[in-house]
Amino acid sequence: MKRNLFLISAFTGLIALCLPSAFAQDLKPPISICSGTDGGSYYLAAKAIADSLAKEKITSEVLVDTGGSLGNISRALRGECNVLVSQPDAMVNLKRNDPASAREFVTVASLHEEYLILLVNRDGKVGELDDLESYGKEASIVLGDPDFSGAVQTWANLVAEDDDYGAVRIASEHDDPEFALEALAQGEVDAILLVTRIKANRALSEANSYLSKKLRIGAMNDGDVDDAVDLAGDPLLVSVGVPSNGITSNLTSCFFGCTDSYKMQAKLYLVKGSIDRRTEKTLRRVARRVGAQIQSALN
């Protein structure tokens, strides 16, 4: 009898030890969103989605300071989040380099447009994207921090589509486009690539306000790079004219036609099988609605 009481007591104690862990797992939100930099455009989209999910009685959490698109993808693959915001070309690069990992993700919704902006020196040898291809190793471009800059992912995709760009020197000594503006103005580098919402970018705003006599937006129009498709099979890059607005008006003009460039859609991705079908259906509906609201606010 005493032995039985001892076993019951031990079993009860074991359950007590396990309960906090079990409850912690039950309390973990079904949706964790990797959102990048706190206060950034990806964070704002993720926060809007989380707020909308709450109205649908679905709990979620928004993880911040998770890096850029590459950081968000890496964290999702490690199981730190199951939903993330990313540039579509980052997913294309993942599919190219690690197809098995890319198959872990499914596209949920498009969120907002991001433009490819090529800043060049008005008096420099590089005036447009094609010039970088022509000058090859004699040209240099600033892309920013590899862990946070979307331009790094975009350039990698351009190189994959047209390997002539692979000869261009990446000016890694300049890991911040804002700091690199003066280097571009002084001719120390030939170009800066930005991937940005057209109404929100500090480097673009600084260039427009203070360095427009030396800098301008160069054309991007290369038929070898615009046939790529995203994870869902849709066109990755769409040809577009760069709008002349509050942060571009001194760098480009639409008087004789806007400067050629490309845009793409930032996307919300989900780790396959990480939530039940009903929750996924609600997430898709909410994300599409938030994406439409963002687009409406930007237009």
Image: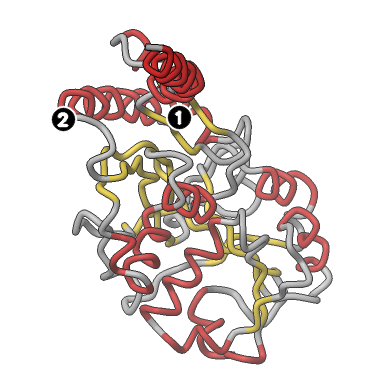
Among the two numbered marks 1 and 2 on one chain, the one whose residue lies closer to the N terminus: 1
Q: Is residue 100 above or below residue 43?
A: below
- In the displayed structure, does residue 206 sit left or right of residue 198? right
- Quarter of the C terminus within the rendering: top left
Residue type of the residue flagged with mark 1: Ala
Tell me residue 78's x, y (percent): 46, 51
SS assignment at label 2: helix
In the image, 274 versus 281, the foreground residue is 274
**Residue at label 1?**
45
In the image, 238 versus 61, the foreground residue is 61
Residue 198, which numbered label? none
Q: Is residue 227 above or below residue 266?
A: below
Residue at image point 51% right, 21% down: 17
Residue 6 seen in the current view: yes
- In this rendering, which labeled residue sits more in front, label 1 or label 2? 2
Residue 277, which numbered label? 2
Residue at image point 47% right, 64% down: 154
In the image, 190 versus 271, the foreground residue is 271
Residue at image point 74% right, 57% down: 176
- Quarter of the N terminus within the rendering: top left
- In the displayed structure, does residue 252 sit left or right of residue 19? right
Tell me residue 179's x, y (percent): 80, 57
Residue type of the residue flagged with mark 2: Arg
Dot 1: few (<14), some (14–19), or many (≥20) neighbours within 10 Å?
Answer: many
Residue 52 seen in the current view: no
Tell me residue 286's x, y (percent): 28, 22
Dot 2: few (<14), some (14–19), or many (≥20) neighbours within 10 Å?
Answer: few
- In the displayed structure, does residue 242 sit left or right of residue 289? right
Corner quadrant of residue 260 = bottom left
Tell me residue 65's x, y (percent): 63, 39
Q: Is residue 291 above or below residue 9?
A: below
